[in-house]
Amino acid sequence: MIVFAADYPFLDVLWTMIIFFAWVVWIWMMVVILTDLFGRRDIGGWRKAIWCVFMIVVPFVGVLCYLIAQHDGMTRRQLERTQTVQQQFDDHVRAVAGANGGASGAVAQIERAEGLLARGTISSAEFDALKQKALAAH
């Protein structure tokens, strides 16, 4: 006897897939919204708690209300966070690369120390100490 999937017809499979997709989308939206909500500094803890309760008690309505009410603010806050991270990265790259045409700070310090050593201003031991200090700082 051949057993078919008659106990679980196509529309039931489709409905299960739709429910699963909606559940995954809701979790994804909750993560994004809660990240935005708890990262905000313009509202207090009580308003954050009310939003959380609203999104948990009435899941899709709460999430959609937050998206409707805060869509511009979410975009602005995400843009500010992105710009801040980019600025920190740029500052770090500049600090590592140094300000003199791409030569690293350690290389520039060692070159200056070599110049002082060549002119006889510092001794070989002082040059080695300056070199170790420059390499340890970077």
Image: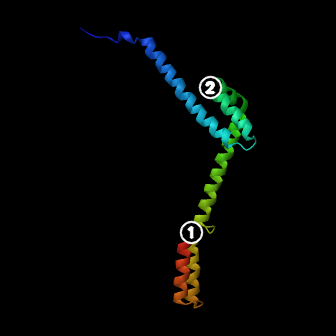
Residue 88 rendering spot, x and y as whole percentages = 64, 55
Side (left or right) of 47 relative to 103: right
98 or 28, which is in the foreground?
Answer: 28
21 or 81, which is in the foreground?
Answer: 21
Label 1 sits on residue = 104
Label count reads 2
Q: Quadrant of the C terminus?
A: bottom right
For label 1, the crowd category at 10 Å Cα-Cα, with few meaning under 14, some 14 to 19 and many 20 or more, is: some
Q: Residue at x 64, y 46 (%)?
A: 82
Q: CA distance from mark 1 to mark 2?
A: 53 Å
Q: Residue at x 59, y 60 (%)?
A: 93
105 or 88, which is in the foreground?
Answer: 88
Q: Secondary structure at mark 2?
A: helix
Q: Give the mark nearer the N terminus: 1 vs 2.
A: 2
127 or 10, which is in the foreground?
Answer: 10
For label 2, the crowd category at 10 Å Cα-Cα, with few meaning under 14, some 14 to 19 and many 20 or more, is: some
Quadrant housing residue 53: top right
Side (left or right) of 30 relative to 20: right
Looking at the image, residue 12 lies above or below residue 24:
above
Q: Quadrant of the N terminus?
A: top left
Residue 64 rendering spot, x and y as whole percentages = 66, 26
Residue 66 rendering spot, x and y as whole percentages = 69, 30
Label 2 sits on residue = 59
Quadrant housing residue 94: bottom right
Quadrant housing residue 55: top right
What's under tag 2, amino acid-wise?
A: Pro
Image coloring type? rainbow
Q: Secondary structure at mark 1?
A: loop
Q: Residue at x 69, y 35 (%)?
A: 49
Q: Residue at x 57, y 28 (%)?
A: 26
What's under tag 1, amino acid-wise?
A: Ser
